[in-house]
Image: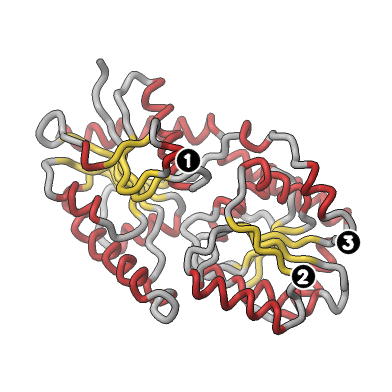
Amino acid sequence: MGKPVHQFIVGASPGDAITDYALLLQRWLREDGFRSEVFAESVDPDLAKEVHTYLRYRPSHPGEMVILHHSIGTALVDGLLSLDVRFLLVYHNVTPPEFLLDTDPVLAGQLLKGQEQLALLRERTVLGLAASPYNEAELKRMGFAPTGVLPNMLDESQYKLDSNPDLLAHYRGKEPLLLFVGRLAPNKRQEDLIKLLHYYRRIEPSAHLLLVGTPWVPAYADWLQEMAQELGLGEAVVFTGHVSQRDMVTYYRLADLYVSMSEHEGFGKPLIESMCLGLPVLAYAGTAVPGTMGGSGVLFREKRHEALAELVDILVKDNALRQRIIARQRERAKAFLEPEVRRMWRVFLREASDAKAS
């Protein structure tokens, strides 16, 4: 049997970016001869065969190296810190608690704990990997060394699924369609997308906004729906909730433009999904977004909604411009495909193993 390199995540659920990331690393580890299981604090029943509760984990030897995916405060981290293990940390970023203080104080407390736990992990971390240069800079500010950047990877096979014909038929005649994918949470600033649609419908009255994602903060999600109703956009703003991979791919194909107003992203996987699927991106240039886009797409630094509505109209209707943007995005997307990311992963894993042994 091979050497154990197990992984730990907070919550395992289908379609979750961190879960997908961990299962991908597990496949790579197993193909390279390691024993690798994924453990989590909470496990969706649909993943019960793939992911185990973290309470079942026992180190096979003192100082065993484990991979910890960190994004929020959790009892799982407390449990690991009580064991004789060393960490290869994969840092997905902790959303600043200030975004949640007014809408979900309990969740804000978990995020604050996540920041505090990050400091405790530093002394026992042999390598801090970040999903983006933005995340790596945060690790460095906190004194982690050595560090590196291992971006999220796109499994191309998951984006070659057939479209859902019912969705295609439902949205026929409701164009143009603006799309944002991400949990409904204050840092994502979906309210700015609703305001943008309000102005854009003065130009294109049939325009719709698709908000694909789970209501991570229910009070915020309720407020967004109330805002849409008050602006007369009750039918024009579509809250899909969690969707299947097939439906998500269909929404990307249906959309005319991906628009992000998010003010905190640790990476921004939907940005590279848009690149892969040929959907032009217009995004607020905050936190990790510029690093993920890598000079592709169209970025802005001021939220002037009326002016942005005019820009949206140009990006929807100017086909020559769209094709140039799409071509540049497709070139950028190559950096997130399996061959390149897997090569980087093998180098980092060897570096972490050498650091643990020294």
Q: Nearer the viewer, mark 1 or mark 2?
A: 2
Q: Nearer the viewer, residue 222 or 148?
A: 222
Corner quadrant of residue 241: bottom right
In contact (CB < 8 Å): disc 3 and disc 2:
no
297 left or right of 219 in image: right
- Estimate the x, y position of residue 56 in percent, counting from the top left: 21, 37
In contact (CB < 8 Å): disc 1 and disc 3:
no
Residue drawn at x 24%, y 23% as measured from the top left: 3
Residue of label 3 = 317
Judged from the image, the secondary structure of the residue bearing numbered disc 3 is helix
Residue of label 1 = 20
Q: Is residue 348 shown above or below 290? A: above
Question: Label 1: few (<14), some or many (≥20) within 10 Å?
Answer: some
Specify whether residue 279 is in view: yes
- Estimate the x, y position of residue 246 in percent, counting from the top left: 66, 41
Judged from the image, the secondary structure of the residue bearing numbered disc 2 is loop
Residue of label 2 = 235
Question: Label 2: few (<14), some or many (≥20) within 10 Å?
Answer: few
Residue drawn at x 33%, y 52% as measured from the top left: 70
Looking at the rendered image, the quarter that the N terminus falls into is: top left
216 left or right of 57 in image: right
Q: Is residue 131 shown above or below 95? A: above
Mark 2 belongs to which amino acid?
Glu
Mark 3 belongs to which amino acid?
Lys
Numbered circles on residues, count: 3
For marks 3 and 2, give the CA distance.
Answer: 23 Å
Earlier in the chain: of badge 1 and badge 3, it is 1
